[in-house]
Amino acid sequence: MLSYLDLQDRECLDRLRHRDGGSVHDLCEDFGVTPTAIRQRLSRLLEQELITRETERLEGRGRPRHVYRVSDRGLKELGNNYGDLARILWSEVKRIEDDTTRRQVLEGVQRSLVAHYSNQVGDGTTSERFARLAKVMVESGYDVELDERNGLPLLREKNCPYPELASCDSDICNLEQTVFAEVLGTPIELTSCWRDGESCCEFEARPAQLQADVVLLK
């Protein structure tokens, strides 16, 4: 089971890691929220196997309490923040002065991404490929959903997968659009983009008639 963590989830895991475990009461004091809110978050983290729960018996006749600790899986998840590294690597690639070398490196990145997704998406109709791509991305931890507009499939990313990169370079958005088009076997249009201030990124299949018109105009 793969997980999707928001910033509050990560902060909760980090607090438990620094504390070497904590109770609902401890976390309520840390975050200044209600026990109900903390229990809901802990329940979700338990379901994702990112934390464990142990029962501690207190001295005397007091009620036992639950202590939550970060699991091995949770510790790995806390380390899976590659934003800074990705931004640095992308910047260094774009700084390659030789145009041919830079283009070859970027094309290699594109081919690798296409191969990665194509191996899992496989063949089928456009709608079937959209559905499989959405499933693969969700299982990889991305917050995406499959939708439809004007009778055509639409892939919606509810959070930008590359916020650090996209905020400084739109080429990463163009790369993702090109990769999706190759994997899905149909032209794709990025009709909504987080970089432009939208709440999500939406990739739509282009209508068949529009595709034909583009071919005739070339």
Image (cartoon, rainbow, N blue to C red):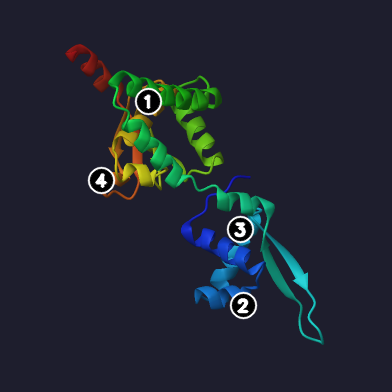
Helix, strand or loop at label 4? It is helix
Mark 3 or 1, closer to the camera: 1
Q: Residues within 10 Å of mark 1 (few under 14, many from 20)?
A: some
Residue 39 percent coordinates (x, y): 60, 69
Q: Is residue 120 above or below residue 212?
A: below
- Asked if the residues shown at circle 1 and circle 4 are in contact, with their CB atoms under 8 angstroms apart, the answer is no
Which residue has dot 4 on it? 196
Say which label, 2 or 1, has the lower sequence index. 2
Looking at the picture, which amino acid does disc 3 mark? Answer: Leu
Say which label, 3 or 4, has the lower sequence index. 3
Q: Residue at x 36, y 31 (%)?
A: 93
Looking at the picture, which amino acid does disc 2 mark? Answer: His
Residue at mark 1 to residue at mark 4: CA–CA distance: 23 Å
Which residue has dot 1 on it? 106
Q: In this rendering, would 148 be left or right of 140? A: left
Between 213 and 112, the one nearer to me in the picture: 112
Q: Residue at x 52, y 41 (%)?
A: 138
Q: Residue at x 49, y 32 (%)?
A: 133
Looking at the picture, which amino acid does disc 1 mark? Answer: Leu
Looking at the picture, which amino acid does disc 4 mark? Answer: Asp
Which residue has dot 2 on it? 25
Helix, strand or loop at label 1? It is helix
Helix, strand or loop at label 3? It is helix
Disc ID at residue 53: none
Between 86 and 64, the one nearer to me in the picture: 86
Between 61 and 80, the one nearer to me in the picture: 80
Residue 4 percent coordinates (x, y): 53, 50
Helix, strand or loop at label 2? It is helix
> Does the image show residue 48?
no
Disc ID at residue 45: 3
- Asked if the residues shown at circle 3 and circle 4 are in contact, with their CB atoms under 8 angstroms apart, the answer is no
Q: Residues within 10 Å of mark 3 (few under 14, many from 20)?
A: many
